[in-house]
Image (spheres, rainbow, N blue to C red):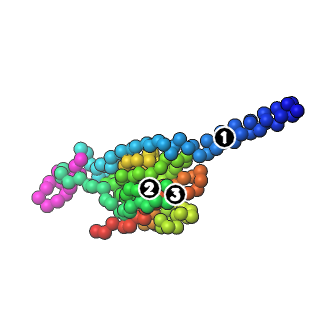
C-alpha cells in the first residue's frame, strides 16, 4: 500500500510544483508589493536648425541671420485625467508636439499598479469602451517604464494623433485596462 501511495503522491507533488511555478510566472504576485518610480523631464528640443536655444529670424529691425532669443516651445495637443479600470490609476496624460515636429505622450503624476506585462497605448476608443478592448488601430508606445511618476513615450512618426481618443495603461498578459484617460483637444 505504501508503494501505491508513493506512486500517487510523487507525481501529484510534481504537478503542484509545476502549477505553482506557472502561476507565479503568469501573475507575478510580488509586483503587488513593489513600486517603480520614473521621473523624466519634458524634452526641451529647440527648433530645427537652431543652435544653443536660439533660432534664426528674419524680422523687421533684425539683420538676416541674427539670432533671436525666442525658442520654440512644445505645444500641448490634448490632455485628460486617468480613471481606474482594473487597478487603481490616477494622473494626467498629455499629447505634445515638440519643437522639432516629434510627438509624444507624457504621463504626469502617474500612480498605478505594477503588473506582469503592462504597456502604454493610444486607442481610438474612449475610456469606457477600452474596458473591453483597445480597438482596431490602437498604437503601442512601449512597456510602462514605471508605475509612479512622470514619463515620456515617443509617438511613431506619421501618427495622426487626432484619431486617438484615449491613452491606456494595458496589461498584455491578461488583456485588461488598468486605467485610461480620455484625450480632449487643447483649446487655443
Local crowd size for mark 1, using a 10 Å CA cut-off: few (<14), some (14–19), many (≥20): few
Front-most of residues 162 and 33: 33
Earlier sequence position, callout 3 versus callout 1: 1
Q: Mark 2 sits on what residue?
A: 89
The residue sitting at 41% across, 51% down in the picture is 111
Q: Secondary structure at mark 2?
A: loop
Q: Nearer the viewer, residue 46 or 162?
A: 162
For this orientation, the residue located farthest to the left is 61
Residue at x 11% of width, y 58% of height: 61
On residue 123, which mark appears? none
Q: Residues within 10 Å of mark 2 (few under 14, many from 20)?
A: many
The image shows residue 143 at horizontal and vertical percentages of 50, 48
Which segment did they paint magenta? 53-66
**Residues at marks 2 and 1 touching, judged by CB atoms closer than 8 Å:** no
CA gap between label 3 and label 1 equals 24 Å
**x, y percent for residue 128:** 50, 67
Amino acid at each position: 500500500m505504501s508503494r501505491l501511495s508513493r506512486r500517487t503522491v510523487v507525481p501529484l507533488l510534481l504537478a503542484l510544483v509545476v502549477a505553482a511555478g506557472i502561476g507565479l510566472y503568469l501573475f507575478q504576485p510580488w509586483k503587488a508589493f513593489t513600486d517603480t518610480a520614473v521621473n523624466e523631464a519634458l524634452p526641451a528640443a529647440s527648433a530645427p536648425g537652431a543652435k544653443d536655444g536660439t533660432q534664426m529670424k528674419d524680422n523687421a529691425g533684425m539683420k538676416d541671420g541674427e539670432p533671436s532669443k525666442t525658442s520654440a516651445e512644445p505645444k500641448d495637443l490634448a490632455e485628460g485625467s486617468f480613471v481606474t479600470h482594473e487597478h487603481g490609476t490616477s494622473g494626467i496624460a498629455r499629447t505634445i508636439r515638440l519643437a522639432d515636429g516629434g510627438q509624444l505622450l507624457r504621463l504626469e503624476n502617474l500612480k498605478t499598479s505594477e503588473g506582469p506585462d503592462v504597456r502604454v497605448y493610444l486607442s481610438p476608443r474612449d475610456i469606457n469602451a477600452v474596458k473591453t478592448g483597445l480597438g482596431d488601430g490602437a498604437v503601442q508606445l512601449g512597456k510602462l517604464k514605471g508605475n509612479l511618476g512622470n514619463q515620456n513615450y515617443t509617438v511613431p512618426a506619421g501618427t495622426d494623433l487626432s484619431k486617438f481618443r484615449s491613452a491606456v495603461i494595458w496589461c498584455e498578459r491578461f488583456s485588461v485596462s488598468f486605467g485610461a484617460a480620455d484625450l480632449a483637444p487643447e483649446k487655443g
